[in-house]
Structure formats: structure tokens, C-alpha cells
Amino acid sequence: MKQLIILSGKGGTGKTSLAAAFAHLAHDGPAPIQAVLADGDVDAANLELVLRPQRLETHDFTGGAVAVIDPELCQGCGTCEQVCRFEAIISDPNSFVYRVDPIACDGCAACVYQCPEEAIHMQPNTAGQWYRSESLYGPLFHADLYPAQENSGKLVTLVKQNARLLAMDTDKPLVIVDGPPGIGCPVIAAAAGADLALIVTEPSAAGIHDLKRALQTTSHFRIPSLVVINKADIYPEGAAQIQAICAELGVEVIGSIPFDPTVTAAMMNGVPVTAYHPQSPASRAIGMIWQKVVKSLAFEAANP
């Protein structure tokens, strides 16, 4: 089993559109490959908007814990308010009983240890939900992290782990992960154990800057990387600069995708662009990129 992760140093480069197209090509292409899909962008999951899956399972995600004060035991001494560095303890001027703001609470448990009446305990916090769904192109694991919640890296790991386990149990040879943007904890969690990283960039100042950061990240974790330039014809000078940077770093640019309004139309209709209009310029370019990705994964499998 191989893991392909699609990354981008910044958002809006077309990463999810490419992941959806790969899901379609893996399932319905000339050489079908059974794949399990995973959306690693739990803060703003949108792969399901294109694949329109049917949810089969829903599970709560517990991310950390928050403090809870028992009003019957609280004596209103104010010790908890004094030790809380996050201003999460709120006093009631009428009853002199304190309560905890769950949004402001950081879960450090300092108030628990300092309360002389042992009136405070830590309660597990449901920070989101993760799902197992079935799409037209295979199983999809995805999640939603609730607003103002943390531990997104832990949730990404949970989503990817379940996708990987299903692939192993059902003998599916490939896991396609639509990774989160940036280079932070969620990206590291999504990229862990990947056999190949495909980095999608665009010819803009921000795209070039964040491409370098993404390549530094995958290089640090020794993940083989390839680069795709999306909307390459909008700014040819920028595309040439990306080619030069990748050549200097020894990273192969395996394809360029032209700007194509069909991609937007396909996204609005909730269909991968390669299924919506197989002969559009973007679809043809993505098809050639997919063939190179498959070849690269097979090469890695033969030469571990």
C-alpha cells in the first residue's frame, strides 16, 4: 500500500480539485487503481463538496479537556480565578460562585490542583466529528473541527489512520490524502509516513514563497516530492521561476495545468473536472500528471 499526499504551501492553489480528479482517474481511468481517500484539511474540509459522498459513520472527536466547577462544592474563595492565566474563570456577583468559560479554557488544569475544596474537575471536550463516507470513487474519510477548537493535528492523524487501516484490511494499494495548506502541525500529521508528496503551486509571489517552505518541510521529513504548477499560463515568468527553483533543489516539475474555466464549472457542479469535461485543457494536463504520479509510486515500490 502506498500513500500519496497532495500539499500546497498556501491555500487556493487547486489542491482539492487535483485530489478529486485523481480520485476519479484512479477509479475510472484506463488503468484503474482501488484507492481510499482522505481529506486531511479538517479545519476547512471541502473534498466532500466535490465528491458528494454518502456518510456511513459519524464519530465524535475528543480533543483535550476543559475545567468544570461544581457549584455545590464551590465556596467562592476565588483561588481558581487568581491562578488562571487565560481569564477563563468567571464569577457570579450575586451568588459568589465561579464558573468556567469553555471557549477561553486552555485545559491546563491549574485551577484543579489549586482548588482547596476540590470543586473543579476536568471534563473531556468534544472538539469535532470525523466521518467514514462512500463516494463514487471509493471510501472517503473526512472530519470537521469545531470553531475555536485545537488539536487539529491529532484529528488529521485519526482521519488518515482510519483510511490507512481500511486500505490494509481491504487490500487497496493506494491512499490519496488531500492535505491541509501551510507547513504547520496538521501538514506534518498528514504527511507522516507518506510515500510521495505532490506539491501544487501557482505562479505568484505568495505561491513561490510558500512552495519553498513546503519543499523544506517534505525534505526535512525525507518525503520524496514532485511539483505541479497550476494556472501556469497566467504568469509565465513566475512559472519559469518555479522551474528554476525546483531545478536548483533537484525536485522534478512533472506538469503544468493551464487556467481553465472548466475547473470552476466542475467545482460548482460538484464533479471532478476530469469527469465533468475529460477533454478540457486542464483535464488533459491532469491526466498526464496522474500517469507520472502512478509511475513514480511504482518506481518507489520497486526501489524502497
Image (cartoon, helix red, strand yellow):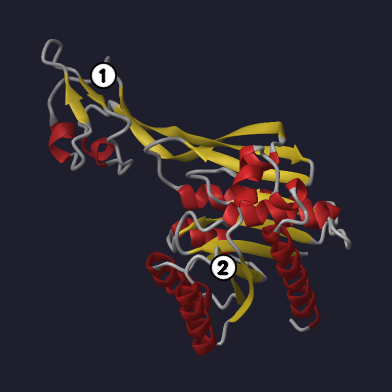
The quarter of the displayed image where residue 228 is located: bottom right
Q: In this view, does 197 lie to the left or right of 288?
A: left
- In front of the other: 141 or 127: 141
Crowding around mark 2 (Cα neighbors within 10 Å: few <14, some 14 to 19, many 20+) is many
**Label 2 residue SS:** strand
Q: Quadrant of residue 134?
A: top right
Q: Name the residue under label 1.
A: 73
Quarter of the picture holding the N terminus: bottom right
Which is more N-terminal, label 1 or label 2? 1
- Tell me the kind of residue under disc 1: Leu
Which residue corresponds to the image point at 27% horizontal and 14% vertical from the top-left? 72
Closest to the observer, 114 or 139: 139
Q: Position of residue 106 (x, y in %)?
A: 31, 41
Mark 2 or 1, closer to the camera: 2
- Looking at the rendered structure, the secondary structure element under dot 1 is loop
Tag of residue 21: none
Q: Which residue is drawn at 77% across and 84% down?
A: 303
> Where is mark 2, residue-wise?
199
The answer to which of 103 and 77 lies nearer the viewer is 103
- Do the residues under discs 2 and 1 have CB atoms within 8 angstroms? no
- Kind of residue indicated by mark 2: Ile
Answer left or right for 68 relative to 200.
left
Q: Can residue 164 be seen in this view?
A: no
Instruction: Check the picture and name the quadrant holding the C terminus.
Output: bottom right
> In this view of the protein, can residue 17 be seen by the observer?
yes
- Crowding near the residue tagged with mark 1, few <14, some 14–19, many ≥20 C-alpha atoms within 10 Å: few
What residue sits 15% from the left and 11% below the top?
Answer: 95
Position of residue 288 relative to residue 279, above or below, is below
